[in-house]
Image (cartoon, rainbow, N blue to C red):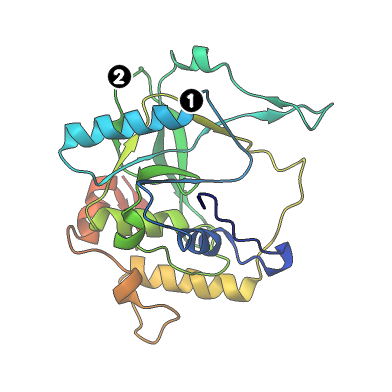
Amino acid sequence: GNRIRICMTDSVHAKGPTYARHIAHTLYNDETYILNIDSHTRFIYKWDTVLEQMLEMTIEEQGSDKVILTTYPAGFEIDEHDPKKVIIPNEHLLRYAGPLELRAKCFGESDGMLRIKACRMDKTTEKPTLAKFWAAGFNFSKAKVIDEVPYPPLEHLFFGEESLMASRLWTHGWDFFTPNHDVLFHCWSREYRKTFTSPSKERTKALKWVQGLLNSQCNDNDILSYEKYGFGKVRTFKEYELFCGVNFASHIID
């Protein structure tokens, strides 16, 4: 059957990662799960079975299927002598390392958007633990999230995407959990590849929209509907701020 669907776009027509994920979600065809990742990613052996078991275990314990496994992956490196070779951390040794947990870092001076970071927990855990934040480059959940919290077609948005989606998902009743061990790895270095800089005009429009939502300054005449792409009604945005320890309007991190 038709199990693989691809949307091909020339790089000159790229509109940033948020818009790309919006397009990717249009390919949804009633699959059970969804895994969002960045490019330049490698996986452990039987990663799919591991993620499915980890998610289903958490769902059973929580008594709700609104569970998302998410974090920033550990890094792998490109061999400087042979770009086709990659250097991945020993996954057996990582089993004895604490999970990578997302934490608030700072607010960007140029865009006012929250930055988050991944930190190793001091101890290993036998099961995923409740998390405060959501990572765009690695999140795994039931695919019904696509319909419940539709991805916004915001062009050239980079910083701001994760705060936007975290607050929207949480207020729609979804909870984030840190995987209890490493499942995949990402090459964080950009030295070996070309990069793309988004047009400032389009990026400014998207940032303004996100800032309007997070700062409670929504404008009905803005580029996207705040009704469709705004917060949910299961929990309030203020409750999310209290839960994660961040005041997005005043840029205060507890």
Residue 30, image quadrant = bottom left
Amino acid beneath label 2: Glu
* Residue 213 drawn at (x, y percent): 35, 69
Q: Which residue is mark 2?
A: 126
Residue 26 numbered tag:
none
| Residue 149 percent across, percent down from the top left | 33, 61
Q: Earlier in the sequence, mark 2 or mark 1?
A: 1
Q: Are marks 2 and 1 in contact (CB under 8 Å)?
A: no
Q: CA distance from mark 2 to mark 1?
A: 18 Å
Q: Does 24 sit left or right of 254 as displayed?
A: right
Q: Is residue 99 visible?
A: yes
Q: Residue at x 52, y 23 (%)?
A: 45
Q: Quadrant of residue 128?
A: top left
Observer-nearest residue: 49 or 241?
A: 49
**Relative to residue 212, is residue 10 depicted above or below?**
above
In terms of secondary structure, where does tag 2 sit?
Answer: loop
